[in-house]
Image (tube, grey):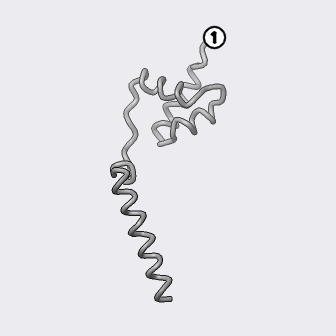
Amino acid sequence: MSLWTERRVVTLKERWAAGASASVIAAELGDVTRCAVIGKVYRLGLPDRPTTESNRKSPRQLVELQSDSAANTMGDLEHA
């Protein structure tokens, strides 16, 4: 018996297109792992989800942005 019934594949496609993560989809489907969802997405040839601004930046850039944000917040507190 396959875990991937027609209904589950439809749900996977709908949730993937809506931008749900593999972890979220796995939890919603139940009895399937995040890795199984990723594998099925790959085998179905579903497109990658659009990248967000945060995952386009390198880890170093993200740390710099967080540092700048924290410095700005501290500056706001000093002037309050």
Query: 57 or 11, which lies in front?
Result: 57
Query: 53 or 79, which lies in front?
Result: 79
Which residue is at 38% across, 63% downward?
65
Residue 78 at what x, y percent from top left?
A: 48, 86
Indicate the quadrant where residue 67 lies. Answer: bottom left
Which residue is at 33% across, 52% downward?
57
Residue 63 at what x, y percent from top left?
A: 40, 58
Query: 44 or 57, which lies in front?
Result: 57
Question: Which residue is label 1 attached to?
Answer: 1
Q: Residues within 10 Å of mark 1 (few under 14, many from 20)?
A: few
Query: Which quadrant: the N terminus?
Result: top right
Give the SS element for disc 1. Answer: loop
Name the outermost residue toward the bottom. Answer: 80
From the viewer's perspective, is residue 64 above or below residue 77?
Answer: above
Indicate the quadrant where residue 43 lies. Answer: top left
Residue 73 at what x, y percent from top left?
A: 46, 76
